[in-house]
Structure formats: C-alpha cells, structure tokens
Image: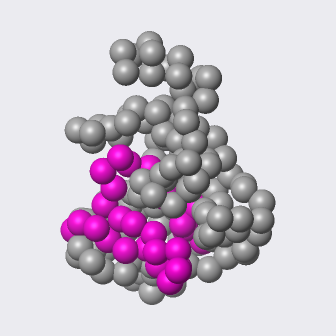
C-alpha cells in the first residue's frame, strides 16, 4: 500500500530514493523545496573501515555505510548540496525546487572512490571523469579522457 504524499514527507524527511536513469543509477530527490543553506537531512549509518559501494568517507580510514539516503546521492561537478561529515548533515548549496534531484561532488568527501566513472552532469566545468580527491584517473579514465581530447 502506498503512503499518502503527506505521510512520506513526515516519515521520510521529504526525501525519496529513485531510479535517476538507467545510465546514472539511483538518486535522491526532495519532495519539498529547499533553500540554500538549509540542512536537508541528518544521517546515520554504520561506521566501518571498509570502502563499500554507497559508503561515504568520514575520516581518513573510516566510512559510513547503510545510510537511508546519503549513499544514493547523485554526483555533479556543480552540486546543489554538500555533506558535512562532522555533523552528519546534508546541506543545500543552492535553492532546490520540489522534486529536484539532490547532487554532491563525490570528490569533496572521498579520497578514493569505490569505482571511478564517466561524468555527464552537464556542468560548464564538468571534469568528465570522476575520481576521489587523492587519486588520479585509472587506465580506463585516462583512455576515456584521451578519447575526448582532455
């Protein structure tokens, strides 16, 4: 049975995991408008030394996994949100309309990604290949960047 939209807003903090597209996988959208500077979500999860798919780096050797929404945020080179890993908060960087996809820059929190990937976010300064902040593009990334003349 589907919950009424009002119940989703109360029970799920007005966030929803969705299939953003077959190419990009899962994402998170807000069901209500968000203002720049607002805390969108406080998150919890399991702290582990293991880098996992959908985990996020908390400190040099620790990651948070099994979060309700945060591990499913989409990447953008020009994100509309940021993660505060000390306060375990997702904060809006820009105004986001209701039903808007929430995005973060993966390199802002991750030294090394679970998996590097092509980026097609459409931002004017799109990096085209996404890595963690402390890693260079892998062989696949170097080949891809060379193929597009970067």
Whole-percent x and y of residue 27?
Answer: 48, 54
Total number of numbered discs in the rendering: 0
Against 14, residue 77 (above or below) is: above
* Quadrant in the picture for the N terminus: bottom right
In the image, 124: left or right of 84?
A: left
Residue in the image at 23% along x and 38% along y:
124
* Residue 51 coordinates in the image, percent (x, y): 72, 56
Is 142 on the left or on the right of 90, as rendered? right
Residue 79 colored in magenta in the image: yes
The x, y position of residue 128, in whole percent, is 40, 32
Relative vertical location of residue 82 with respect to residue 23 in this rendering, above or below: below
Q: Image point 50% across, 83% down: which residue?
A: 87
Q: Is residue 7 visible?
A: no
Quarter placement of the C terminus: top left
Which of 13 and 53 lies nearest the eye of the viewer? 53
Q: Nearer the viewer, residue 55 or 14?
A: 55
Q: Is residue 133 above or below residue 69?
A: above
Q: Is residue 114 magenta?
A: no
Classify residue 56 as left or right of residue 129: right
Q: Is residue 40 visible?
A: yes
Q: Is 64 drawn above or below residue 107 in the view shown?
A: below
Spot occupied by residue 144 in the image (x, y as percentages of width and height): 49, 20
| Residue sticking out furthest to the bottom | 10
Colour scheme in the image? one colour
* Residue pictured at 52% horizontal, 74% vertical: 85
Q: Magenta part of the protein: which range?
A: 68-95
Q: Quadrant of residue 45?
A: bottom right
- 63, 45: nearer the viewer: 63
Q: Which of 112/72 is in front?
A: 112
């Amino acid at each position: 049975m589907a919950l009424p939209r009002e119940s989703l807003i109360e029970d799920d903090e007005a966030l929803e995991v969705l299939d953003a597209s077959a190419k990009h996988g899962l994402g998170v959208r807000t069901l209500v408008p968000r203002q720049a500077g607002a805390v969108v979500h406080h998150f919890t999860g399991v702290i582990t030394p293991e880098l996992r798919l959908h985990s996020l780096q908390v400190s040099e050797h620790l990651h948070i996994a099994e979060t309700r929404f945060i591990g499913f945020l989409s990447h953008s080179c020009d994100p509309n949100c940021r993660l505060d890993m000390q306060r375990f908060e997702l904060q809006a960087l820009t105004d986001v309309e209701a039903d808007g996809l929430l995005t973060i820059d993966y390199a802002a929190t991750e030294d090394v990604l679970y998996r590097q990937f092509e980026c097609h976010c459409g931002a004017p300064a799109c990096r085209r290949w996404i890595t963690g902040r402390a890693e260079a593009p892998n062989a696949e990334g170097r080949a891809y960047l060379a193929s597009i003349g970067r």
